[in-house]
Image (cartoon, rainbow, N blue to C red):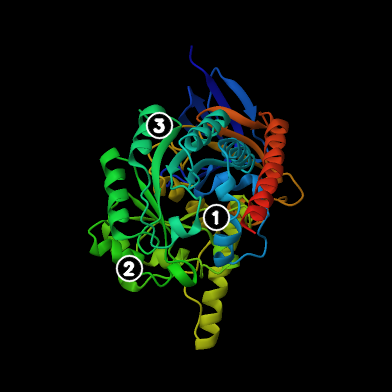
Amino acid sequence: MTNRMLLRSGHVISMDPDIGDLPGGDVLIEDGKIVAVDRDISADAEVLDMTGRILVPGFVDTHRHTWEAPIRGCAPNATLDDYFVEVLDTFAPVYTPEDVYAGNLAGSLECLNAGITTLVDWSHINNTPEHPDAAVQALGETGIRAQYAYGSANTSLADYWYESKISIPGDDVRRVRDRHFASDDGLLTMGLATRGPGFCINDVVEAEWRLARELGIPITVHVGMGRLAGRFGMVKQLHDLGLLGSDTTYVHCCYFSEEEWRMVADSGGTVSVAPQVELQMGHGWPPVAKAIEHGLRPSLSIDVVTTVPGDMFTQIRAAFGSDRARVNAECWQADIPVPETMLTARQMLEIATVNGAHVAGLEHRTGSLTPGKRADVVAIDATALNVAPLIDPVAAVTLSADVSNVETVIVDGVVRKRDGRLLADVGRARRLVEESRDRLAAAVEARGKQQA
């Protein structure tokens, strides 16, 4: 039986240049797929009245350590150097599979609540084979669209982040691929989250790149960030190893030489920028405009809720404000007019949606409200006092709205949030992360006493 849903009379911002924006537009969904975007669509369907709502494609978060939800806010003042000690060398070693499940469950629901319909889960918490199973199970239960990026264990900072000689276990990656991701057509797909040169010896780097390419899964790696990795010249090292490719996403990219930018662009690589983290924790200036200058299509990501909020509105504004501030300051200093290439509100919405889908390797499925794509749609309440009156709908989404205005969220044609409320057991998710928080705090204290 065909299942049809008609989103009626919303202000459609399709992010598809062939469709454009449609005030009073309709979106027809059939069996999880967008089949029409137009005005006054007539169809035998369940009708959702979108009057006074802005319809946009779901946001895409291209890099989040979702497992950290139980320790939200534990490192509010941390620099990147602090984070390695306070999180990766303190909490990560005592994480159980139950903690990972709780984090991914609550973290994925947090995404959906905020209008993030697609997530790259950068999961470097695979301390046992049960850890990835727990992470994937939670992602599947929430109904989010996600790329599960299998990462290393994190039981010792010295073993896993200082010229590490320990590779991600290929046999377990193959097991997870076979067990959970036999098809690449589902809501959940797989990637490999690798640490890269500088953090690992070259033999490990080459082994992990070979593993990903053997399995036909994309690679995601942190590069060019902070005082340490900013000096590694990681992309240049990868180039010298013959490993650059279009299957790789480079996260942060704050300290790239011009040569490295060209290498990424020439290889077809993609870029994920986490603006609030980068500004706050000392990774470097968010290089959104820099990526665009080199012909790349940058995306946005949240990174860690240990230190920053978990919504895309924050990231949009951090990137938009910081880059325009940088350009304005440079132009003032040089006493020249600001260039016409400064970031715009519409560019930011593009970066948060269709660019994100491109970076996650899912642009053929999501990222725009285009007939033939899967139906990942978010409705923003434009009648709320912090959004109304509506003058520029794109600016309303990027500069005025917040999580409280995310009224409806649809993923793959399934309503996951309606009338401002998640259609999920939020109480259970909150209870699990609270129990996990308490268990982790106790385990950290016990471990500290043992090491004293």
Eye-nearest disc, 3 or 1: 1
Task: Tell me the amino acid under the disc marked 3.
Answer: Gly
Q: Position of residue 2 (x, y in %)?
A: 48, 15
- Please tell me whether residue 298 is drawn above or below residue 191 in the rendered image: below
Task: Tell me the amino acid under the disc marked 2.
Answer: Glu
> Depth check: 100 or 26 in front?
100
Secondary structure state at the residue bearing disc 3: loop
Q: Position of residue 34 (x, y in %)?
A: 47, 30
Q: Tell me, yes or no, whether the two marked residues, 3 and 2, touch with CB atoms within 8 Å.
A: no
Mark before the other along the chain sequence, 1 or 2? 1
What residue is pinned by disc 1? 88
Secondary structure state at the residue bearing disc 2: helix
What residue is pinned by disc 3? 372
Eye-nearest disc, 3 or 2: 2
Quarter-of-image position of residue 201: bottom left
- How far apart marks 3 and 1 lie (CA) works out to 42 Å
**Seen from this angle, which residue lies furthest top?**
1
Mark before the other along the chain sequence, 3 or 1? 1
> How many residues crowd around disc 3 within 10 Å: few (fewer than 14), some, or many (20 or more)?
some
Which numbered marker is on residue 260? 2
> How many residues crowd around disc 2 within 10 Å: few (fewer than 14), some, or many (20 or more)?
some
Secondary structure state at the residue bearing disc 1: helix
Eye-nearest disc, 1 or 2: 1
> How many residues crowd around disc 1 within 10 Å: few (fewer than 14), some, or many (20 or more)?
many
Task: Tell me the amino acid under the disc marked 1.
Answer: Leu
